[in-house]
Image (tube, rainbow, N blue to C red):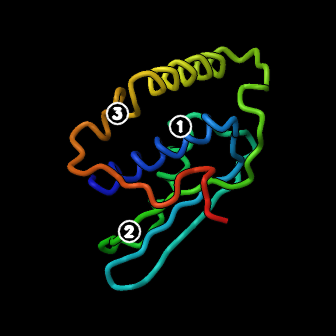
């Protein structure tokens, strides 16, 4: 359970930064370094654009379900095939419209009160907070 809490924190931070920079993604990746020195990673490309935290987490969670059952040292998540058109797609789908409104509201709360103002039930009892390695959109290249 602790690994899932950390993964959700990583995905939430990544998704928030993705939206803050105006991007959607068509691909997510997940990986782990294990205590025994081995490494595992998988990725999935999606047809529909992903921007909501819960959508990205659902795909990444499915990827981690196929990971070897070994003690994990470090986990990572990432996105690829980015497209700069956040909220540009108009839709008649009521569920998608509500998701857009919800993510915009969450992002405005994060902007005003910080990223820890709203948390998911998954991370409610998390013992540790994640640390940034490379901030989204701020690589040293």
Label 2, label 1: how many angstroms apart (C-alpha)?
Answer: 21 Å
Q: Where is mark 1, residue-wise?
A: 16
Characterize the local packing of mark 3: few (<14), some (14-19) or many (20 or more) Cα atoms within 10 angstroms: few
Label 3, label 1: how many angstroms apart (C-alpha)?
Answer: 12 Å
| Mark toward the start of the polypeptide (3 vs 1) | 1
| Mark toward the start of the polypeptide (2 vs 1) | 1
Q: Position of residue 96 (x, y in %)?
A: 65, 22
Q: Which mark is residue 55?
A: none
Q: Does 121 sit left or right of 90 as displayed?
A: left
Residue 5 higher or lower than 118, as above or below: below
Image quarter for residue 69? bottom left
Label 3, label 2: how many angstroms apart (C-alpha)?
Answer: 22 Å
Mark 3 or 2, closer to the camera: 3
Residue at point 68%, 55% (across, down): 80
Q: Which mark is residue 116?
A: 3
Numbered disc 1: secondary structure: helix
Image quarter for residue 49? top right
Q: Does 75 sit left or right of 82 as displayed?
A: left
Residue at point 62%, 22% (across, down): 100
Q: Where is mark 2, residue-wise?
A: 74
């Amino acid at each position: 359970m602790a690994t899932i809490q950390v993964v959700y924190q990583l995905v939430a931070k990544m998704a928030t930064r993705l939206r803050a920079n105006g991007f959607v993604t068509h691909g997510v990746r997940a990986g782990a370094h294990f205590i025994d020195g081995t490494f595992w990673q998988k990725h999935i490309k999606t047809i529909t654009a992903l921007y909501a935290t819960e959508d990205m987490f659902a795909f990444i969670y499915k990827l981690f379900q196929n990971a070897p059952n070994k003690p994990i040292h470090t986990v990572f998540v990432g996105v690829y095939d980015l497209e700069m058109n956040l909220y540009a797609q108009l839709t008649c789908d009521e569920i998608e419209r509500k998701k857009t409104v919800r993510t915009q509201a969450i992002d405005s709360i994060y902007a005003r009160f910080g990223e820890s103002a709203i948390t998911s039930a998954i991370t409610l009892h998390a013992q540790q907070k994640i640390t940034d390695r490379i901030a989204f959109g701020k690589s040293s290249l």
